[in-house]
């Protein structure tokens, strides 16, 4: 049996972990119902365990979100970059989420940093680009779909040869492809409505400070089946 490895890059808020599970568990919850019999799930905490074994020892790679910032260049995070470059060069299937999205873009020659418009939180509309419509993974999604988001940093400059697959009014780089089977997304396909609600509750003061209405954001939380389906569709490439 081969493994799909979930690279853990951070922890969710304690109240989220207590009620719904940590970041890696949210991925496992979404994937477990669609996992083929030949595939198992493995979690690797890059902050505690260091660089994983050779990328080719895995059938696929997913990278979680984190409350860390890619631009702070923490040693464990920087150590992952050559490993991610190797995975890309060897065409190992990859899907990075939020921090994982920003880290992959940074590893491949882009720039991830604080977004000048501030934090994006809540359930937002995301739109496919023309390239997204033609992409083997993203073509399964509708042109417009809802996605859960919480991030202060974004991919501010694309890596060479990256293709933009989705965008929205806040972020021009909501989804990227770097190679035949290597993607990343700024939004959180693993989040559920209760998890998104818990994040906005925690961020209420910060959101008010930047002129947002947290109660309106909570009222606007919806299901995001299309975005969540990406995780399961990705299994086809492993």
Image (cartoon, grey):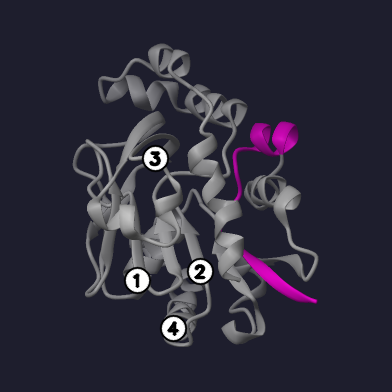
Q: Residue, x 48% and y 87% (percent of image)?
A: 90
From where the camera sits, is residue 171 visible? yes
Instruction: Magenta stretch: give its range.
Output: 1-20
What distance separates the C-alpha of mark 4 from that of mark 3?
34 Å
Dividing the image into 4 quarters, which one contains the N terminus? bottom right
Residue 116, horizontal then vertical, whole percent: 19, 42
What distance separates the C-alpha of mark 1 from that of mark 2?
10 Å
Residue 79, horizontal then vertical, whole percent: 48, 78
Q: Is residue 16 above or below residue 2?
A: above
Front label number (3 vs 2):
3
What distance separates the C-alpha of mark 1 from that of mark 4?
15 Å
Q: Is mark 4 on a helix, strand or loop?
A: helix
Q: Which mark is residue 94?
A: 2
Q: Which of marks 1 and 2 is nearer the N terminus?
A: 2
Q: Residue, x 43% and y 77% (percent of image)?
A: 81
Would you say the residues marked 4 and 3 are in contact, meaning their CB atoms lie under 8 Å apart?
no
Q: Residue 142 carries which label?
A: 3
Q: Earlier in the sequence, mark 4 or mark 3?
A: 4
Q: Residue, x 32% and y 58% (percent of image)?
A: 134
Q: Is residue 31 left or right of residue 92?
A: right
Q: Earlier in the sequence, mark 1 or mark 4?
A: 4
Q: What element carries label 2?
A: strand
Looking at the picture, tell me which residue is in the foreground, 160 or 204: 160
Q: Which of marks 3 and 2 is nearer the N terminus?
A: 2
What distance separates the C-alpha of mark 4 from that of mark 2?
14 Å
Q: Is mark 1 on a helix, strand or loop?
A: strand
Crowding around mark 1 (Cα neighbors within 10 Å: few <14, some 14 to 19, many 20+) is: some
Would you say the residues marked 1 and 2 are in contact, meaning their CB atoms lie under 8 Å apart?
yes
Q: Is residue 94 above or below residue 217?
A: below
* Residue occupied by mark 4: 82
Q: What element carries label 3?
A: loop
């Amino acid at each position: 049996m081969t493994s799909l490895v979930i690279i853990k890059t951070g922890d969710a808020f304690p109240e989220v972990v207590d009620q719904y599970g940590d970041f890696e568990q949210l991925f496992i919850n979404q994937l477990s119902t669609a996992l083929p019999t030949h595939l198992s799930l493995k979690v690797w905490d890059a902050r505690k365990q260091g660089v994983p074994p050779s990328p080719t020892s895995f059938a696929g790679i997913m990278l979680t979100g984190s409350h860390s910032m890619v631009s702070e260049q923490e040693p464990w995070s920087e150590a992952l970059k050559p490993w991610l470059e190797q995975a890309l060069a060897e065409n190992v299937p990859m899907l990075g989420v939020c921090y994982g999205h920003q880290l992959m873009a940074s590893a491949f020659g882009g720039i991830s940093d604080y977004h000048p418009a501030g934090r994006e939180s809540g359930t937002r509309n995301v739109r496919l680009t023309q390239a997204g419509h033609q992409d083997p993974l993203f073509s399964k999604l509708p042109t417009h779909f809802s996605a859960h988001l919480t991030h202060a940093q974004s991919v501010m400059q694309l890596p060479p040869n990256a293709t933009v697959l989705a965008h929205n009014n806040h972020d021009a780089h909501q989804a990227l492809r770097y190679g035949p089977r290597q993607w990343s997304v700024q939004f959180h396909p693993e989040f559920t409505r209760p998890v998104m609600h818990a994040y906005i509750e925690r961020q209420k003061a910060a959101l008010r400070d930047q002129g947002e209405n947290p109660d309106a954001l909570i009222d606007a939380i919806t299901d995001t089946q299309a975005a969540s389906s990406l995780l399961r569709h990705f299994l086809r490439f492993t």
